[in-house]
Every structure is written in structure tokens, then in C-alpha cells.
Amino acid sequence: MVPVVTHASGDVDQARAFLGRYYYSSFVDVLSWRHCWQTRFDVTPSGTVTLGDLQFGTDVKIRFGELGAYHVNLPMTGSLAWRQGRDAPRQATARTAAVFQPVGDTSLERWDGDCRLLAVKIDRAALEEQLASLLDAPVRSPIRLGPTIDVTRGPGASWLRLVRLMAADAAQPQGLLHNPVAGARLQEALIAGLLSATDHPYRDRMQRPSPVTAAPGAVRRVVEAIRAQPGEPFTAADLAAIAGVSVRSLQEGFRRYIGMPPMTYLRKVRLARVHDDLRHGDPARHTVTEIAYRYGFTHMSRFAAEYRAQYGVSPRSSLRS
């Protein structure tokens, strides 16, 4: 993900152009002109997931047409009246998120001026490919997601916490979302979390254990790739592609033959490489942070605790020795 892009203006056309650049083309109708109103958009875009903290500042109606992506609006304050396709109008609040499909004409019938919301845009292919990987089976496109999510309890509340965490992290220049390794995994987690939090025709099948197990050859290919390039920003989907099986099958295979999930194995290999680089590094030319970051470790206190638990000394002591 790239750093946050901010837009603040009292000009309707500028606001519409900004939304068109990072979300969707639209027509904006101002329903009530407030004195000195101002939009405030903070958006973190990427090819897979776009996060936005959006507030219009006055009551508006927005017509989008078809979105072409999966999308969720999570009001933090105020409310949002919306509709898609031929469905009846619905209301989104701080308790109920609005879920939009890629197809069907879409309109925000009334976005209240005091409504500040988190807008999550998810690439259509990314969501459908991740669901197919989780199921180890093809899925019919588009996925018909349930139109609302209860974000006050259960998976919906957990998913809202994840979105809030990612939105806050995106505002930090050194946040995990901007790290190629951690950022890709967080985006995968956000998509998988949505698939667990909302209703859809495949939800029950997601909960069933997979009978398919990756063959030893598939596991071996992933082990070799990890050992050859431990610093690569591998995601679970990347490793499954190397293996030639689904994410779920690869996880089953690793648990059976390696005794741990593939991403846990990757982390252990990375930790071992950091250990080797620290022991042979020159403290006058290198730092612990530089070496750790090279292998995808960005949370230094957590890394240091994990390193000490594994090797009995601090990373700094290994570098000095």
C-alpha cells in the first residue's frame, strides 16, 4: 500500500474527482448547503484493498452505477441511507455496516453531513480467488455477499476492529501496511475476515475441514523456495501458487509433514537468517533494525522478544559478538 492520500475541500467537483480517482466515478448532489462545509478524505490505495476515512461535511446523495469491486461502508458516526440494484433502501449505522456487490447500480441516498465512515474497497478478483483457495474449489462470480454486517458482536465486531487497526496503521509512514511482507498478509487477513463476517453461499463450506492434503512434493517446493529467498514478501497465496495447490491444502500438508503452518515455518527461517547475519555482521556498518527489516520483521520489540526466546540473547548482543 502507498501512504495516505488526503483531500480537504469545500468544492463538490473536487470531491467527486477525488472519489473517482481512488474509488468510483459518481454524480454528487448536495442535499443541504452548510456554511463553510468541507470534505475530508484520507485514503490509502493499493491494487487489492483501498481503505478510506471519509467525511463529506454536508448532506449529499451520490450515484455510482456499478462498482466493479466488493465494498463495505462502516459508519463511525452518523448514518448512511443506501441502495443497490432493485433491493429496498437500507440504513448503515455504527452498529450495521453496508456491504456492496460489484454489480448493480449503486446509490448513497443520503450521506449525512455528520457521518464519518471507513470505506473498504476490495478488488473483485482478489476476493474471489482467495475464496476459491480457501475452498479448494472454483466459485461462481460474483459472490453474493449479505447486504449488511452486524459489527457489534461476533466475527463482525472482530472484523471492524481489524479495519480500524489497519486504517490507523495506514496513517503511520512506517506502519506495517506499508511493509511489503506484513502489508500483503494484513490485506489477505482483511479479505478472509470479511468472508467469515458476512453471509454468502459458501460460508458453511468454509467452516468444514478440507479432506485434501498437499503431497510431499508440493511441500518440498515451498520449503526450497523459502530457504532460497527468505526475504521475499511471500503471502500464503504466493506459497500455494509455488506448491501448485490451494492455500488450505498447503496448510494441511505443512501441518502433516513439517508440524506447523507454512507462514510459521517462513517466520522461523527468517529468524534463523537474521541470527546468522547478526553474528557475522559488522556493528560499525549494520544495525539490528536494518537486518531485521531485510527479512520482514518490522515490530522491533516483538522481534527482540521472539529472538531472545529462541537464542537466549538479545539481537544487539549477537551483532556485537
Image: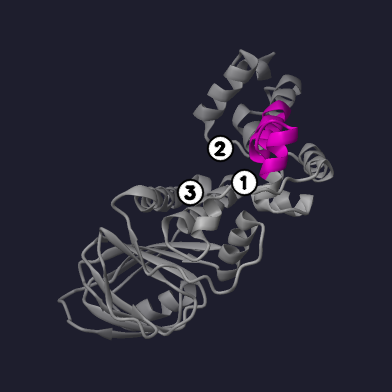
**Picture residue at 68% right of the left edge, 35% below the top:** 255
Q: Which residue is tagged 2?
A: 298
Residue 245: x and y in percent read 74, 53
Earlier sequence position, callout 1 versus callout 2: 1
Q: Secondary structure at mark 1?
A: helix
Q: At x 20% / y 67%, what residue is drawn?
A: 114
* Nearest to N terminus: mark 3 or mark 2: 3
On whether residue 269 falls in the magenta region, the answer is: yes
* Marks 1/2: CA–CA distance: 9 Å
- Within 10 Å of the Cα at label 1, are there few (<14), some (14-19), or many (20+) other Cα atoms? many
Indicate the position of residue 164 as horizontal and vertical percent values: 37, 51
Q: Main secondary structure of the magenta part?
A: helix
Q: Nearer the viewer, mark 1 or mark 2?
A: 1
Name the spot of residue 240 as percent of width and height, x first.
Answer: 72, 51
Residue 202 marker: none
Where disc 2 sits, the SS reads loop
Tell which tag, 1 or 3, sits nearer the viewer: 1
Q: Callout 2 environment at 10 Å: few (<14), some (14 to 19), or many (20+)?
A: some
Disc 3 designates what residue? 173
x%, y% of residue 172?
44, 48
Q: Vertically, is 312 above or below 29?
A: above
Report, in whole angstroms, how far the alpha carbon at label 3 lies from the one at label 2: 12 Å
Within the image, what quadrant is residue 65 found in? bottom left
Please, what is the three-letter code of the amino acid marked with disc 2?
Thr
Quarter of the image for residue 115 reads: bottom left
Q: Which residue is mark 1?
A: 181
Element at label 3: loop
**Which residue sits at x=34%, y=81%?**
87
| Mark 1 or mark 3, earlier in chain | 3
Quarter of the image that includes the C terminus: top right
Q: Nearer the viewer, mark 3 or mark 2?
A: 2
Which residues are the magenta region?
251-273
